[in-house]
Amino acid sequence: MKKKYTIALTGLNNTDNPGPGVPVIRALREAKSFDVIIIGLAYENLEPGIYMENVCDRVYQIPYPSSGIDTVLERIKYINSKENIDVLIPNFDAELFTFMKAEELLADIGIKTFLPTVKQFQERHKSVLPDYGEKYGLDIPKSKAITDINSIGYAGLEIGFPLFVKGKFYDAYLAYNPTQAATFFNKISSKWGVPIILQEFVSGTEVNVIALGDGKGNTIGAVPMRKQYITDKGKAWGGITLNDKKLLDITHDLIKKTKWRGGMELEIIKTINNKYYVIEINPRIPAWVYLAVGAGQNLPEALVKLALGEEVESFNKYETGKMFIRYSYDLIGDISQFEKLSLNGEL
């Protein structure tokens, strides 16, 4: 008889800028080594994953990380008193620091996590990515972190236009001149704060790698894909797995050097001259994780086992030519569900 674990997850906003929560849940429900009870943790009461059938067994609203570690932990402790959570999987960049800092406190109440260390998280920030590339032997586009709008002109002269204007957590826009860059600076900084990163535009094909490191330098799994359809937010709406040894070599080498712990995503531009520029390193499982599952690597299942201290064998293959395509779907619910979550904070 398979063991049953209670897994709590965030990232239920399955919209045009989807969180990884729903695909991670789908992967865990297909796990071969254990069964799951899924506890959804929602920041907003209209996150689609709350209302989707066969996704969450129960849902609780939690406060934003900006409210402070103590406030978040008090809510998690309450939820744990009712649900006895085995593993918690945060799925947003903006919340990771809070949960990393609270890792020992969570462990004290029986909740396991498997997250990057604070050092691993901080040194791959977009604002210091060039230094990261130099340290670990990666090609990185020219970039500069700025904190005020007046710096755009000087940075633009140094980097050249067009260039990407990026938030420290999310959002990226291609600007063709300083006026556009200033507009995007205001738009992003009002949402995510500063610094804002200006990054050189590199022409080529965007390819990504999802990977899982065991914290000891070993790659448990890695699957590369090419984006086939990209939304106006830069999100993959379709993709296909690739047979690209260079992408895998870059990933394995980085995980070995950094001893990366947990899920990660490498966003890379492959130029026409077969040069690979790393444009972002996301410190968590990406929203297209279910493609990796479909290709033969159930990385969320492996992550849960690592969190629980179990031995996990590395995946040694995946299927190439596997595709994913996202689609929109109208959910029909009842106002009573919305009211219950809004009033009681749980559903």
Image: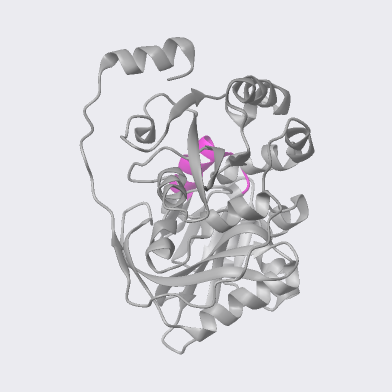
Image position of 65 (left or right of 186): right
In the displayed structure, 2 sits above or below 312; it is above
Image position of 98 (left or right of 6): right
Q: Residue at x 46, y 79 (%)?
A: 270
In the displayed structure, 105 sits above or below 70; it is below
Task: Work out whether residue 153 can be spotted.
Answer: no
Task: Tell me which secondary structure the magenta stretch mostly adopts.
Answer: helix
The quadrant holding residue 127 is bottom right
Which region of the structure is painted magenta? Answer: 182-195
Q: Nearer the viewer, residue 262 or 29?
A: 29
Q: Residue at x 75, y 66 (%)?
A: 216
- Spot occupied by residue 27 in the image (x, y as percentages of width and height): 43, 52
- Spot occupied by residue 73 in the image (x, y as percentages of width and height): 69, 26
Task: Work out whether residue 134 can be spotted.
Answer: yes
- Spot occupied by residue 281 in the image (x, y as percentages of width and height): 58, 62
Q: Nearer the viewer, residue 166 or 91?
A: 91
Residue 131 belongs to the span the image colors magenta? no
